[in-house]
Image: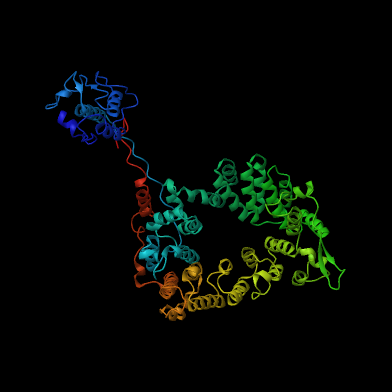
Amino acid sequence: MPDATRTAPSAPTPGTNDTATGVGVGVGVESRADVFAPPAAESGLPTGGVPWEELVTAALLGTDRRPSRSGPSAPATSGHPASAPGASAGPTALLDAAALHTVRRRAALLPAVGAAPPVPAPADPRPPLPPAARRRLAQLLADRSAPSAGGRRGSAPDLTELIPQWLALAGERGYRAPAEKLPALLDAARARTDLRPRVLSFAGPRGLWLAALNPDWRFALRASTGAHRTATGSPGEIRRLWEEGLFAERVALLGAVRAQDPAAARELLAQTWSAERAEDRLMFLDSLRAGLGEADEPFLEEALSDRSRNVRSTAAELLSALPGSALARRMASRAMTCVNPDRTGDALAIAVEAPHECDADMQRDGVTPVPPSGRGERSWWLGQLVEAAPLSVWPERFGGRSAREIVALPVADGWEAELHAAWCRAAVRQRDPAWARALLGAPSIPPASGPGTASLAERSQLLATLPTAERADWVAGFIAAHGLSEAFQLLGVCALPWAGPLGRAVVDALDIARDAGSYPWSFSGVMGLAERCLDPAEADRLEVLTATQDEPEGASPGAGGYWSEAFRRLVSTLRLRAAMAAELTPDGTTPDDATPEPGTEASPEGRTAASGAATSGRDQGAAAPDAPGTAA
């Protein structure tokens, strides 16, 4: 028995510290305290031996500071006199006694009831990925592009930036995710929130089934519970989730119900509105932007009296987006008392008289009384009134003139910048393309002297209200006139892939910047956008730009090599995107299409994915120690 106790699988090896002060032995025993934990009902040895708690205390403090007495149940061990009955236990005897406890407890274990296997993964009727596309997905998820030396990106494409585009293409073609890649997809979505909507759509029902088996992937359940319950649940289940679910689940549920039945979502929100926290009311109210209509006006009017200022402001913003709402009429009446035609001169102008106070009614309608630092009160109030007024009132106010003609009128007393900025915000809020065109002006006009705002951020918001093709043409004209230095934000609102004129304008501007000897790092953001947004068909035309040119006089040292490297990366990325699209087309698959998808043979569906879930969670913690009274 003494030899058996020393070689028991759970018995720790004595530490190398011979002084037995607890530095070596104590730490060794402490790290295995979970293995030697006694049964819940056992406070000591029934045979009168040393209690387990005393052994643990001696191990933690060290046998020199807290000697332990080995009891009658610990027989003497050959070669270890310290373990004789009644002797003071040293480090070796202490570990022998701990091993004896463990062997005694394990000898009395009873078999445990086996855990029930998970329910089978649901079927996914979508077609499988072509083999070439499946291999491409594995490459993108593994990110096999090695970083270049010296911090340079090199000419290899950045695979991680192409994952969203690949997922969008696969979703458009209606493919299902390979079962063996679901763990890697969910891990990628966990790390990058921008990937989550596309990953969850691509993963489908199998992805949700797998996410339920790993706590690290619970975000997928929170994000999809609402849509799932809305599609499959009864009204009682939907109401129960709304009343008892987590906040993220409730937000997802409200959005899903709103997408199917706006009135039902509004009624669901009204049931618990008075009991919600202010920050929750704000988030729920914001979900009404989708499908906003005149039927929402009574609920939003009541929200104008909410206790929270942020809730009142959001309700007022939503109501002002409804030109026929009572709030929009009230704000129009106030705005027209401040902005009037001025016919005192030779030509028509605009006269502005900003409000002198912000009364209680204005504050109830969402006007914030206290301006930001550096803004005057009257100009701050004026901007809010004009922003919330329907743009349709101004043509009638100015004799039937169009938006372009009204914007071109002179504004008296230096109010032009404030008035035009408010009209810009109104055009964005009301999604009015006619006013957006008028306030943007011609793309060749410098922003500082244009008819609307000089802010590129506000200009990009105005551009977002225009049709896709018109938006691309305007940005192409802006780049041709002003270059790329101010176009980065404007490019971000253009549809993908960039239209031909826009793509050519960007490439021509990059070529001009290279010929001028500019720093290539100054255009790294635009170059990154071009890699993701240019039409892949432009790759052959760009090949000529990959050659290293002689650096002009006064150019940045080494700029030519950097430009050549950047253009090579651009061309290789475009060709990779073209290959990705071809691999995802049904007629672009490789001859080995007949190869069955891993995980779909005779084994049950989802077995490979479940194995991946177990593998992913394997490192979350060590195996649990043997529990008293059960066997692993």
Q: Residue at x 42, y 66 (%)?
A: 158
Q: Residue at x 45, y 65 (%)?
A: 162
Name the foreground residue: 266 vs 572: 572
Name the foreground residue: 600 vs 456: 456
Q: Position of residue 280 (x, y in %)?
A: 61, 45
Q: Position of residue 159 (x, y in %)?
A: 41, 65
- Judged left or right of residue 154, residue 297 is right
Colour approach in the figure: rainbow
Quadrant (top left, top right, bottom left, bottom right) of the C terminus: top left
- Tell me which corner region of the image, top left, top right, bottom left or bottom right, holds residue 584: bottom left
Q: Residue at x 34, y 59 (%)?
A: 601
Res 590 visible: yes
Q: Residue furthest front?
A: 554
Q: Position of residue 544 (x, y in %)?
A: 44, 81
Q: Is residue 270 placed above or below 36 in the rendered structure?
A: below
- Judged left or right of residue 75, residue 482 is right
Res 392 visible: no
Please tell me how many numbered marks the rendered image carries.
0
Q: Is residue 471 placed above or below 80 in the rendered structure?
A: below
Quadrant (top left, top right, bottom left, bottom right) of the N terminus: top left
Name the foreground residue: 7 vs 549: 549
- Judged left or right of residue 218, residue 135 is left
Q: Is residue 182 placed above or below 447 in the rendered structure?
A: above
Q: Residue furthest right?
A: 344
- Tell me which corner region of the image, top left, top right, bottom left or bottom right, holds residue 308: top right
Q: Position of residue 334 (x, y in %)?
A: 81, 56
